[in-house]
Image: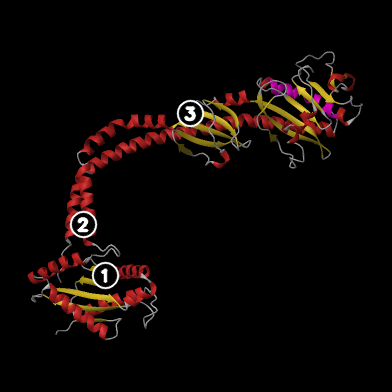
């Protein structure tokens, strides 16, 4: 049984592949250049993310120390209130009225200097001995060694203090009342109100937004811990962190061509190094991921100990230029090799597209009528020269005009596509060719040894279409079906294309006459 000759488009494809083989060297050079560029860029981006992770770890470590220290002071303060303050002297005799400030302050006792003790300023009259306010003052003064140690470890810490619901504040280091005195507004600030159970029912450590210090030490943020006694809120211990300190933390890991920013979740700036902060909301950005935005390459990293974010803002152009510089020799080689063949490659692509459009049906993707005529003549010529058999099958969709008129042309186009796909699933040997001749008319060229095998093959085709179960209200069978007519051409016969087509068409007509949804083989005039 002779094989059908390959279609002429396949020969063209082989020519194109041969030519494409000639440009593989160019593609390889381009691939190498691109790979080198991408690797250099990937290294730069990976190094940027790694630097961001290291910087976040460094800042987190520093803030975790502050948080742990404050938590320890919170525990100790509540212990002192629950039991008894270890302070060896009574604070009450040293509380002096301050009429000019409508309150009172702590006079520095004999034997103490400014480094050893902070100052108490309060509103109203001096509290009586054994009052709740006095108990809290004794507790706060007993914490002074811890306050002093924290300031000694980090001289950039502006203040450590205890603010009481009894309307006083113990502030360390000590300042004169002329420099700072507690006011009613103090008890409405976020470092105190944020710790109040009304706003912090869980009793968590809280961080304030950035604000300007009332005592004149610039911009800062505060971490506060609520203090309770017997389940009742008494006040808050607070530690201030200056924004200058935060900026210093941002400089601990050097990152070239990159501005660094500490932002709150809503985008408010805490500290910046290297330029103004970008206008973004960090909590809405993907984290630990570089995102390019114009000339900027940005990455957002959340901090563990607070709802703060580190934002890296790199010069994307500088990173690309460095990656390009590293891969430049390969790019020059690729451009040199590629320039002479770009035009040829474009022409070949255009030729292939034109050939595809000229030989294939636009709707189904099958071979079209032009390809059928060419390949049928070629197959018949081969049959006359020594081929054994050739089968030509014609078929069309039963009652398709009524289907189109009833359901519309879009549904008809979809049905033709489904039918084409079903037929290709059966006629999928290398020798099988499926064509759409026009409208609902199709053809198949195939090799079959005898009429019996041809009839079986047509049965498979018809069954494949029925199994698509394409509903057809106007059909007696309820679904779309096809009728087929086939002719088997043997070696030695001298059929012309028109004769073969006429014989297959006659067999198709016979199938229609037998009730459709069947196939008939041509048996002679």
Q: Which mark is residue 355?
A: 2
Rate crowding at label 3 as few (under 14), some (14 to 19) or many (20 or more) other CA atoms within 10 Å.
many
Q: Does the magenta stretch include residue 81?
A: no
Residue at 24% x, 58% y is 357
Above or below, comparing residue 251 to residue 37 in the picture: above
The one of 429 and 258 positioned closer to us in this rendering: 258
Asked if the residues shown at circle 1 and circle 2 are in contact, with their CB atoms under 8 angstroms apart, the answer is no
How far across and down, in percent of the image, does residue 279 sit? 54, 35
Q: Which mark is residue 208?
A: none
Residue at 28% x, 72% y is 440
Rate crowding at label 2 as few (under 14), some (14 to 19) or many (20 or more) other CA atoms within 10 Å.
few
Q: Can residue 147 be seen in this view?
A: yes
- Image: magenta residue range: 135-151
How far across and down, in percent of the image, does residue 427 sit? 26, 70
The one of 484 and 110 positioned closer to us in this rendering: 484
Mark 1 to mark 2 CA distance (whole Å): 23 Å
Is 66 placed left or right of 187 in the picture?
left
Please tell me which of labels 1 and 2 falls first in the chain: 2
For the stretch drawn in magenta, the main secondary structure is helix
Q: What residue does disc 1 label?
A: 427
Q: What element carries label 2?
A: helix
């Amino acid at each position: 049984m002779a094989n059908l000759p390959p279609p002429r488009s396949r020969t063209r494809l082989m020519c194109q592949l041969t030519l494409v083989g000639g440009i593989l060297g160019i593609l390889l050079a381009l691939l190498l250049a691109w790979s080198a560029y991408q690797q250099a860029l990937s290294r730069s981006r990976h190094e940027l993310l790694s630097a961001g992770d290291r910087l976040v770890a460094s800042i987190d470590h520093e803030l975790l120390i502050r948080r742990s220290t404050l938590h320890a002071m919170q525990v100790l303060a509540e212990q002192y209130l629950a039991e008894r303050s270890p302070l060896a002297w009574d604070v009450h005799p040293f509380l002096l009225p301050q009429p000019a400030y409508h309150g009172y302050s702590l006079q520095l006792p004999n034997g103490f200097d400014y480094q050893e003790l902070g100052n108490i300023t309060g509103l109203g009259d001096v509290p009586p001995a054994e009052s709740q306010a006095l108990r809290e003052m004794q507790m706060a003064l007993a914490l002074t060694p811890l306050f002093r140690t924290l300031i000694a470890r980090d001289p950039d810490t502006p203040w450590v203090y205890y603010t009481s619901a009894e309307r006083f504040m113990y502030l360390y280091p000590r300042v004169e009342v002329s420099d700072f005195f507690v006011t009613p507004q103090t008890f409405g600030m976020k470092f105190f109100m944020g710790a109040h159970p009304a706003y912090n029912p869980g009793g968590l450590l809280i961080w304030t937004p950035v604000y300007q210090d009332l005592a004149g030490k610039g911009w800062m943020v505060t971490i506060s811990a609520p203090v309770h006694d017997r389940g009742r809120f008494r006040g808050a211990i607070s530690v201030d962190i200056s924004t200058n300190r935060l900026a210093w933390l941002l400089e601990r890991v050097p990152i070239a061509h990159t501005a660094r920013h500490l932002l709150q979740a809503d985008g408010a700036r805490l500290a910046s190094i290297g330029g103004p902060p970008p206008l973004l909301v960090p909590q809405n950005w993907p984290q630990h991921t570089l995102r390019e935005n114009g000339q900027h390459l940005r990455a957002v990293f959340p901090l563990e100990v607070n709802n703060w974010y580190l934002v890296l803002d790199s010069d994307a152009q500088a990173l690309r230029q460095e990656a390009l510089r590293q891969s430049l020799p390969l790019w020059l080689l690729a451009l040199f090799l590629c320039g002479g063949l770009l035009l040829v490659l474009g022409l070949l692509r255009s030729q292939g597209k034109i050939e595809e459009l000229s030989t294939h049906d636009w709707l189904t993707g099958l071979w079209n009528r032009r390809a059928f005529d060419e390949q049928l003549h070629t197959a018949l010529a081969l049959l006359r020269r020594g081929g054994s058999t050739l089968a030509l099958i014609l078929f069309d969709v039963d009652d398709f005009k009524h289907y189109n008129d009833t359901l519309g042309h879009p549904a008809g186009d979809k049905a033709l596509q489904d039918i084409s796909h079903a037929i290709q699933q059966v006629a999928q040997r290398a020798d099988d060719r499926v064509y759409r001749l026009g409208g609902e008319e199709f053809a198949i060229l195939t090799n079959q040894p005898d009429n019996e095998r041809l009839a079986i093959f047509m049965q498979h085709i018809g069954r494949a279409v029925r199994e698509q179960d394409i509903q057809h209200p106007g059909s007696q069978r309820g679904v779309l079906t096809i009728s087929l007519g086939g002719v088997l051409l043997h070696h030695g016969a001298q059929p012309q294309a028109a004769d073969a087509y006429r014989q297959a068409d006659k067999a198709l007509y016979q199938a229609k006459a037998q009730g459709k949804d069947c196939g008939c083989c041509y048996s002679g005039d």
